[in-house]
Image (tube, helix red, strand yellow):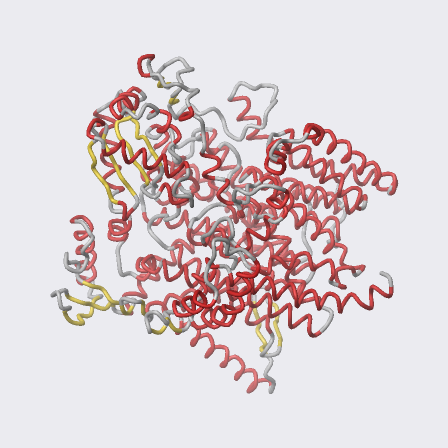
Amino acid sequence: MHPLVQRWLPAVFTVVLVLWGAFTAIAYVGVPVHGAVLLSDSAQIAVNAACPETADSSQAGVMLCRGIRSLWPAFSYSVSRWFWSVENNAVHSLLWFFIASAILYACCIGYSILRHGTAHVRLVLSPLRIGLLSLGILWLLFTSMSLGSSESGPYRRIFEATPQMYTTSGTETLGALRENIDRLEQRGCLIFRGVTDNNTRVFDLRLPCMQTFFVTRVLPPILIVIALIFVALVIGRASLGLLRLRPETLLTEGVLSAGVGAGVLIAVLWTIAALGMFTATPVWLLLIAVLAALYRHGLYWLSALRRRFVIDVPWHDISLLLGWLLISYVAFNALTVVRPFPIGWDDLGVYLNKPRLIVSYGMLIPQMGSFQWEYLTALGFLLFGYDSILGATTAMMINWSEGLLAVLVLYAFVRRFLPKAALLACLLYYTLPLVGHFSFADMKIDNAVFAYGSLATFCVFLGMFGEREADDDARLPPRLRWLLVAGLLFGLALGIKITSSMFLFAAGAVVMGALLGSGGFVGSALLSLWLYIQQGQLRPLQIMERVYGTPPAWTDVISPALLIMGVGCVVLGFLSNRSALRSTAASVGVLAAAFIAAILPWFMYNNIASGDIILTRLLTSPPNTLTPVIDVTGTMKPDAKTYVLPPDLAVNPSSPTCQSTAKTEELDRYWGFGSGWSHYLLLPWRTVMNLDAVGYYVTTIPALLLFPLLLLLPGFWAGNRRWLRWLWCSAAFVIVQWIFLANGIPWYGVGMFFGLSVTLATLATLAPTAVARWTAGILLGFSLLLALGNREWQFDNMQNLYEYPLGKVSAEAMRERTIPHYDDIRDIVEERAVSIPDRPFVFRAGTFIPYFLPRNLERIPIADNQLEVFKCLYQERDPALTVRRLKALGFNSIIFDTNTNTIEQDPNGTLHQKVRAFVEFANDPRAGLKIVVNDPGNGIAFLLIP
């Protein structure tokens, strides 16, 4: 680095950090949707009065006006709301947890002063002790909540189930609530507190009884997950032993063993399903046989759990706070997951529905044709009962463990390369609201994508940037062994979700760059984009249409240009590093071969089952022989599995009503409907600011926008930080892929948060001046505080779910109170499938019904979530004709999500129009539909077709 640059770069970095960091933080809290969450009601009124919302509140002036006035209220409210509820004028339920934690911390300091004469905190820890500490924090959170209050009074407060108290509840719901109270009374768990004005008895739940529910409801699924993690550790260590790969630290070995072991277990479970033996007995025998055959590895881990290490830091060391916060946050999410059934749209429809489905069929189903994480999820239902509460809770807890694995992988990576930033990096990732959404609410598998993509990337960096090994007498040198494991893990990640390809291509570019320089990285990145085009994932024509309106003549040249430039850059890299030719070929070859080996089993199975013997396509699923085919347009021949409209009921497929608008309604809502290059280039800004889409599940933090500032950080350019520069390049390439491939859906680009979390944590760690360190710390701390404020807001909205782990309600009572109609609908659907065998299907337009229907692949042939099929069938606006068409296609009932149009902001948009048409159809007497359920409050309508 030039001496002049070296002299002035720290000052430039500090100034830019202060200005850009302040601007992004102020703008973030100035966005109205953020203020609605982060400000108290009184603060929102004051801000709206001073800076009224405009038609375009995304203008910088409006955002700064609102942001400056929101900065302190957002900070103070985000802190105070964890201790005191302003709206309810009551102590927050977690205040006792904070008080107890502070007392225990003070005792540790006092003990250190008395024992060692210093205020240092000296902890002798081991993996086992950390695990027990985590369970202790979980218990303390549970106990604190049992002592807390909500707007309706103490959490322990229970009201008698009377029509006067539960005015909106039906007979079945009241009956379930009465049974719940009677059961608690019989156990002696209730303390009578009086009678309300409407003559309803009031009780409090005894604390000892609540503690028994911690043992019976909270601990079992967590202990089961711990047991499965132990099995994964055993399998993983045995697998790594075959490669003669032994990482130098216990942390790296443990994380790698857990990831590899879980992946091997997924592959074995897939094989069992492919053999049609996916039942409880073979899987129980498998788990027992693994522990018996690999007992030496089990003994090793039992010994390693007791391996001790010492932490000796000053009492004010920030790592103590960060470590406590991270463990507490993970435990808090685990407590939230303890519920008798899923609650999210995606987990009910897909990520917990698929595991439940494969258990109901006992064999491989088309939706699980690759090595998917859901095979582990299915163990909950398989081992503990398809309809059991423990099975459902365990399945959700297995998906919660994805987040735990993701945090551990991230911690191990940063601990290896920049130890002081490890805890901060983990918090920056795991507290992201959108990550929280699939860590405790909608239990999806994106944390698994992050975990496996990050673990594979970790192996790449260990291979390329140094992991010393004592055992080097294997056939492959250490670098190639690490790349071999990385390739296998990337293959597993691809089986879990196709979006992990962003991880793969970024890591491949890093390998090329580390060996061939910048030419290798750029060339590899360009070739990756070319491959996306060949696979139909990246569409230059659509991009040019959005940018220019009419695609320019040179659009067709983009694909060959990427190929030529990519090859050219790689060749230049080889020419400038001629000695790296052999090592590059070996490294890329091993990585690619291992990747192919990991996907080959399911790839071959699916293609051969589909009749593609020569393997010309990458099929992620075998042919679907279970779900009937519904041919609306009449292009197929009817048979036992194909339902076709007869000629007299045929639709006009060229009609505008049969042209799809679903993609725009579902996907484009995440990145808006803008045009020009700004639509793409400003997407990161709009996503962080939630200018296109709003909701907890798409919310991030303003600190993400500090990512470009790493280029001004002097420590970034240090000679021993080569790994950091390539990580930055990797993250930048993932962001580019996300911008052009993912329609702005944040979790599709979950891989970018790996590099973002690590690089942002370096801002505070490597800041060159005191001012820069304080500024970086304040900006990152403020972002974490905003993330915690969002989490507390979500906690307030989900408080009723905590009644189950606390013991206030039974699973039956919670189901009847939360989703009261689904059990009745399930019974009707099953009965009508038998009584009307020629019309056994349900026409599904949204709702959570798939999860509750066993073998629903045969009951729900289509999911018309955006009413595309209905729009085509209803093209003449003739209700009677539409009903005849539905009957001819085999449908006997309709289930409709009354919240369908809420995903579209425009009240005159195409989705709103389709919903209005459906409501018109359903209420028209000419249709003759029998309305069984019409409950907009619970978002569901169920109609019978005569």
| Closer to the camera in the image, 650 or 445 | 650
Which quarter of the rendering shows the C terminus? top left
Where is residue 727? Give x, y as percent: 70, 52
Q: Is residue 729 left or right of residue 44?
A: right
Q: Which residue appears at 39% of the width and 47% of the height?
A: 344
Q: Compared with residue 426, is residue 503 higher up or lower down, i.e. above or below? A: above
Q: In this view, does 778 lie to the left or right of 585?
A: left
Q: Which residue appears at 42% of the width and 41% of the height?
A: 378
| Closer to the camera in the image, 785 or 373 | 785
Q: Compared with residue 865, is residue 627 higher up or lower down, i.e. above or below? A: above
Where is residue 332? Give x, y as percent: 44, 62
Q: Compared with residue 738, is residue 530 higher up or lower down, i.e. above or below? A: above
Where is residue 440? Give x, y as percent: 43, 54
Residue 509 visible in image:
yes
Residue 227 visible in image:
no
| Closer to the camera in the image, 293 or 894 | 894
In which quadrant of the rendered view does residue 849 lie?
A: top left
| Closer to the camera in the image, 863 or 341 | 863
Where is residue 230? Give x, y as percent: 51, 52
In which quadrant of the rendered view does residue 779 lie?
A: bottom right
Which quarter of the rendering shows the N terminus? bottom right
Q: How many labels does the image show?
A: 0
